[in-house]
Amino acid sequence: MSFVEVEFAFFLPLVLIAYWLLPRARVAQNSLLLVAGWLFYASWNWKLLSLLVFGALLDFAIGRSLGSRSLGDVDARGRRMLALGVSLVWNLGALAYFKYSGFFAQSFNELMTAIGIGASLPVLHVILPLGISFYTLQRVGYVIDVYYERQKPSQSLLDFLVFAGFFPQLTAGPIARGAELLPQLAQPRQLTPKLLASAAGTFLLGYMLKAWVADTVGTTFVDPVFANSDQYSSGLHWLAMLGYATQVFADFAGYSLLAIGTARFFGLELPINFDAPFISKSLPEFWRRWHITLNRWLFDYIYNPLVAGSGWFRGRFYSALILVFLASGLWHGAAFTFIVWGLMHGIGMAVQRGWDEWYRGLCRKDRKYVTLRKSALYGLLAWGLTQLYFMLSLIPFRAGSLADAAGFARHMFVSNGNVTLSIGTMSALDDLLCVLAVVLLHLLELPRLRRFRDTFFAMPAPLRGAVYGVLIVYLFLFVPVGASTFIYRQF
Amino acid sequence: MSESWKQLCAVAATALAVIVGADIALARLAPPRQLREVQDGVADLRSKNPDTLVLGSSHARTLHVLGGELERRTGGAQTLVAVPLENGKLVAYDWLLKNKLEPLVDATDGDGHPAKSRLRRLVLITEWWDSCPRDHDSPYWNLPARAWTFDDFLADVARDGINGFNRNYLQNRLRRIFSGSSLVYDRTQQVLVKYLVQAARHQPLGPTREEVALTTTQWQAMVEHGANCIGDAKQMQALADISEFAAARHLEMTILLFPRKPATLNERSRQTTLPQFAALVRGFAAPRGIRVVDLTTTAPVGDDDFMEDFDHINAVGNKKFASWALEHDLGFLLQPAPPPVSSMAQGNGP
């Protein structure tokens, strides 16, 4: 089940009505959320629901166990580490088995063949449990936080099971921290007009981004070029890359908003996942604005412990950055294309860090460099380079193989293709509006332009209603038929 | 009610008013069609005691119109119920027959007598496409889902999870909830934007000459390629099952090969797909004593009698067809079917 499929049009209203008809009591509300979450998951594959439930039960027990002994208790250190180890082995082991076993076995076999050794490992073809990359990280984050006493262990099994299987975020995040969601689950929720308005607005915006922008742009001028790269001109390759950046943003930001909006319908707040990433002027800023919850997880639980720990990586910021983004690439998918994508961003982040350090040195010597850094030209250049780098990194991200990625990259500069995209006038206008919608969303996040957004919300209610009505009619007419799968759902 | 709730209601009410207003305005360009669906046919069979049961794809809707004419001409002495299964194939008809129609056909009243005591005929409407295998890369064409109950849906979900196949059930339910909406209806037709542009340019509404030419070419190619797929083993087995169903109940069975829009047929398909399929059906029917009525090219319906989809006969064509067919090849429907040698009424039926 996904937010833009027809079943959700039945599921959500039914669960919502039941939820708000229940007594405003934590146990009643959480019980319904638990049943809804499990039903939501079981509608995809009820057998693999057991994996989700067992992992949640294990982590709840481990959390309780960790909470019963203090971090400072020297005698309990071994038992605490064992408990943490069990959780990590189970969670990361399951992730590795389901997501990476086939990839590593196949890669090993290919390597052996290449060097002339006939050894071969059996390649397992196992179903990738839906959302495993997301719910695993959320639970691992919780257990580590409890271990380091940054988070009190949940005392309620019911609350924890909802935390581990809250259906709006179950399949593709946002990855919440225990401290964000568990306290909310410990309180009964009240229905307020503000909450309902916010939920509906967020949901509508998410739907617009996913079902209209992402699916329109993807089908009209991204998929055809990627499918037959050699047939199209270099110009269309650049257009397709621009389109893909728009598509992947609209797809995942749209998904995230749908998740956040759905959670708000139940009176729960999920962390935001996107914050206008295309206005970023540096890669670190970009990654603070793009898939925020994953990146903060990677930095909280991999980067920071590495550079601040006592191991080899201590103080080795550049190596740690590359490692973190390699992990990010591998997290996205068990394929070399994702590893290359991660490597590109790891190197990009390391270069950016080096540049920043070097430039800070210049600024300390001469204040004119501070002025230069604040100039519009510097900003424009930084913005252009950041966005260009991100866009280029999407080539391996989108391509089916490294060979395809190399071919596409080559055709961006040299191509004999002369096939044109046959888009009708209305379709072209619709595509243009899609891109403008994304641009507008970003512009409205700029401090100088935020007041326009505020002006809209200050308009009389009927006027706002009319705007929403027109938008919905437009979506009815222009959302492509047949919702496509969310790109990030496959991760 | 607090001010905020009032504001929220005002936003929702205005939005709804705009949507409904637009829906009504757009309905003038492309009004939603209330098509007879399989549920309607099943409901009719449940409540009526017809002489003839008609089973087929969406083409069976034409026989529904013919049923009205039949009833008028016979003063209600002869009736039929047409059950159209949108986009169905023989396997789907067989599923429908066994799972939804059989319980109704075999039902008895409180005294143990057959509830459908008048039922003597089964007319199966088909064409070459029905005997081709299901397109496996397109599970979304699960049209039997239109005949599903919620239990059927749940059983399928429990077995395979929610997928494109069983999602048809929900999509169909949702469409029926909003069956009066032009905006919802257009999700299946995708013509409103085009019509809006045409209306703005003061052009006649409908497909352009280029679109008609393209669709004609595509249809001709599809029918022509049909020669490569007709007679699929599973579909033919389903046809055999359907005929056994009729024989076991002593129903006089007729296979009606439905008229095709003349423009969709080129010379090649007239020499390959159509005669090959007709021969296949006749070869199947002859040893079983099944009547075959081949109206693929002989019914007096022209290109103008078909809808824009090139597939279905339009309202004017349906009337023309009904009138003509009852005077010609389907005239037998005007008369009662000969009584079976050993009828169900005598207690020898299943």
Image (cartoon, rainbow, N blue to C red):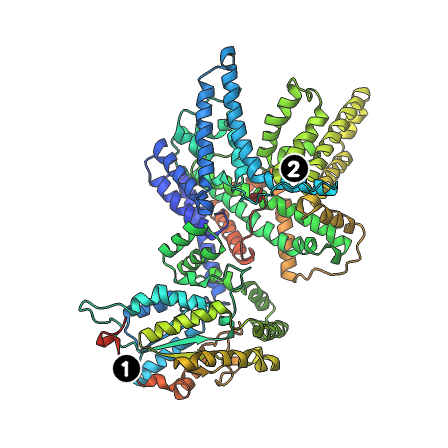
**Can you tell which quarter of the image residue A352 is in?**
top right
Q: Nearer the viewer, residue A55 or A329?
A: A55
Residue B261 visible here: no
Vertical arrangement, residue B129 with respect to residue A340, above or below: below
Q: How many marks?
A: 2
Host chain of mark 1: B
Left or right, residue A323 beside residue B66: right
Amino acid type at circle 1 is Val
Residue placed under numbered mark 1 in the picture: B341
Vertical arrangement, residue A379 with respect to residue A490, above or below: above
Closest to the camera, between mark 1 and mark 2, is 1
Q: Which mark is residue A329?
A: 2
Q: Position of residue A80 (x, y in %)?
A: 50, 19
Callout 1: 10 Å neighbours few (<14), some, many (20+)? few
Amino acid type at circle 2 is Gly
**Can you tell which quarter of the image residue B272 is in?**
bottom right
Quadrant occupied by the C terminus of chain A = top right
Q: Position of residue A267 (x, y in %)?
A: 43, 36
- Assign a secondary structure to mark 1: loop
Q: Determine the CA span between mark 1 and mark 2.
A: 75 Å
State yes or no: discs 1 and 2 in contact (Cβ < 8 Å): no
Q: What residue lies at 42% left-to-right and 40% top-to-bottom? A: A38
Residue A123 visible here: yes
Left or right, residue A236 beside residue A308: right
Q: What residue lies at 20% left-to-right and 69% top-to-bottom? A: B112
- Assign a secondary structure to mark 2: helix
**Can you tell which quarter of the image residue A105 is in?**
top right
Left or right, residue B133 beside residue A447: left
Q: Nearer the viewer, residue A49 or A430?
A: A49
Q: What residue lies at 80% left-to-right and 57% top-to-bottom? A: A416
